[in-house]
Image (tube, helix red, strand yellow):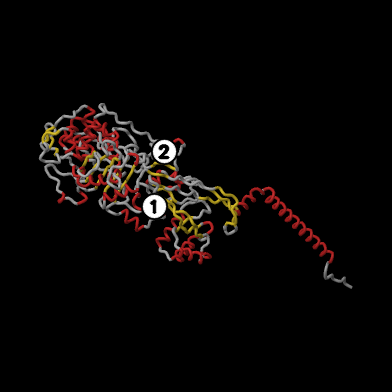
Amino acid sequence: MPEPIRLKDHEKDARLVRARAVVGATAIVLLSLVLVVRLYYLQVVQYQHHSTLAENNRIHVQPIPPNRGLIFDRNGVILADNRPSFSLTVTRERAGDWQKVLDTIVEVLELGPEERALFEKRVRQGRRPFEPVPVLFELSEEQIARVAVNQFLLPGVEVAAQLVRHYPQGEHFAHSVGYVGRINERELKKLDPVDYSGTHHIGKTGVELFYEDLLHGQVGYEEVETNARGRVLRVLKHTAPVPGKDLTLTLDLNLQKAAEAALGDRRGAVIAIDPATGGVLAMVSQPSFNPNLFVTGISVKDYAALRDSIDRPLYNRVLRGIYPPGSTIKPMVALAGLDSGVVERGTRVFDPGFFQLPNVSHKYRNWNRGGDGWVNMEAAITRSNDTYFYSLAHRMGIDRLHRYLSQFGIGQRVSLDMFEEASGLMPSREWKRVSRRQAWYPGETLITGIGQGYMLATPLQLAQATALLANKGKWHRPRLLMQADGLTPEQLVANGLLETRPTPPDIQLREPHNWDLISSDMQQVVHGARGTAHKVGATARYRIAGKSGTAQVVAIRQGERYNRNKLQERHRDHALFIAFAPAENPRIAVAVMVENGESGSGVAAPVAKQVMDAWLLDEKGQLKATAQFAAAPQEGIREQ
């Protein structure tokens, strides 16, 4: 009988189960060991690293931007302040798809494609991680409400309150105080990212730019605890920011308005200086513009209107405008002639209405074609006789002219804290050889002697030269700063907050009384019966020392006469006038330039007188006492 077949081998199955149990148990033990080892590595070996990461996810350091310093005029009138404003900010790291978020903002606030492009430009600008970037300023109550209602659609978007720069005087000080604007990519690369963290604006022009380091202040910080959505739960540590210094300028609001009113709607520049200190009392460049447009970002349309205007309102004529000084430099040329011994006080020149170089047929015309006959220095300055100064320039030569006029600041930057200033040009043999690769010709010396030809000067340089005449050669560089938080410029320099700029040496004459002689001649220009500006002097309550001038815009051919009717308005001569007063004790030096004004004595001189009246006379039309004039601190400011 065959052996029965087993349906199941229990012993074999038992061995298989035991083997599987051993393998499973071994795997569990090994995996547990791996887990334990991993936990040990993470929690023991790398404890410091991961605890730091966890802390960073919970605690953030947020910068606190400092309040920008305020700017005042010499009487305490505020010229630049900080105004509270609500801004819309976007934090890229918390916004997720920030492009979509921007689209939602535009839709919610019903804005246009121009604003959308501007938002993206601002968000893309490189900033610190997790730093909110303002994309829209000065939100209205309706806009704030719309953002609040649609907050669930706007991750990473917040409405933040901040201080925004504001210029309450509007156009009055646009070219002197300047304005702030948003930090651009180029500026961002140059700035200290720590010092400017949380700050979105920087000085762009004028005082705002030159004194940026003083106005900006020092950033503060907060350590805050946040939740997973980045919301601040509590403040762990607070370091207060240091606000910027408040600046007091030498400018006077009332005088500024008086100068603007005197210039009216005409294009031009007016600059008034205190000769005793160099403090700028008024600085007008007309036309002007509203600096508030630039603070939070000017629109393309508004900027195009300013940029493309034929009147160039953005152009600072006081500092950047370079014009032939014309006859306004004749007092300096006369002083140079006396000091060099080329002429004496009584030296006379016969004027038939023109001057000719020896063996040259070309005639260099006097403005008075009929001539003035025999003229000495006093008559030449009083009448602004060109022939006399052609002769004097010829006898002096360009080398001496260049040396003397350079001492008055012609052809160089003269200010302490007006970085935009152009240097102008005081021509010389060397300059022409290098720039034009040509020799200097005698005829060029003649026209240099009457402030024409290659010579170019800014209104500020003419005002400084006038102040030097008033000061009898004592140099004080023109400046705008009077004090910063009560500290004088000297104290700021001593504390390392400002860098010094050397002052040129005083002008020393062989015969100091020649200063008084030239002043007397300039007084005859205004108060003499034959003076070119005698109409202005007829109503003056004080003695004025002045000099009128005109500067050609287009050349006139030999033998032709100036005919205003044949010229376009913008091709007509510029009108200039310089003056200081009272002549015996100068308290103000003024330079006026009216573009295409044609007559220095008829157009520019009345402007200068109105400015001096506003500064020197009280409400009753009487000369103010000396004690009423505030003296600004002495100089010592950096150059950029």
Mark 2: secondary structure? helix
> Could you tell me residue 304's position as x and y percent?
33, 56
Q: Can the viewer see residue 454?
A: no
Left or right position of 583 against 391: right
Identify whether 152 is placed above or below 202. Answer: below
Mark 1–mark 2 CB contact (< 8 Å): no
Quarter-of-image position of residue 581:
top left
Q: CA distance from mark 1 to mark 2?
A: 24 Å
Left or right position of 438 against 303: left
- Which residue sits furthest bottom? 1
**Picture residue at 57% right of the left edge, 58% below the top:** 231
Mark 1: secondary structure? loop
The residue carrying pointer 1 sits among few (fewer than 14), some (14 to 19) or many (20 or more) residues within 10 Å by Cα, namely many
Quarter-of-image position of residue 249:
top left
Identify whether 368 is placed above or below 294. Answer: above
Q: Can the viewer see residue 446?
A: yes
Task: Please report whichever mark, 1 or 2, sits nearer to the chain's N-terminal start.
Answer: 1
Q: Report the amino acid beneath label 2.
A: Pro
Between 107 and 200, the one lying in front of the other is: 200
Image quadrant containing the C terminus: top left
Q: Report the amino acid beneath label 1.
A: Tyr
Image quadrant containing the N terminus: bottom right
> Could you tell me residue 184's position as x and y percent?
43, 50
Residue topped by disc 1? 167
Residue topped by disc 2? 489
Between 277 and 554, the one lying in front of the other is: 277
The residue carrying pointer 2 sits among few (fewer than 14), some (14 to 19) or many (20 or more) residues within 10 Å by Cα, namely many
Identify whether 294 is placed above or below 637. Answer: below
> Could you tell me residue 40's position as x and y percent?
71, 50
Left or right position of 54 against 511: right
> Could you tell me residue 23's position as x and y percent?
77, 58
Q: How many marks?
A: 2
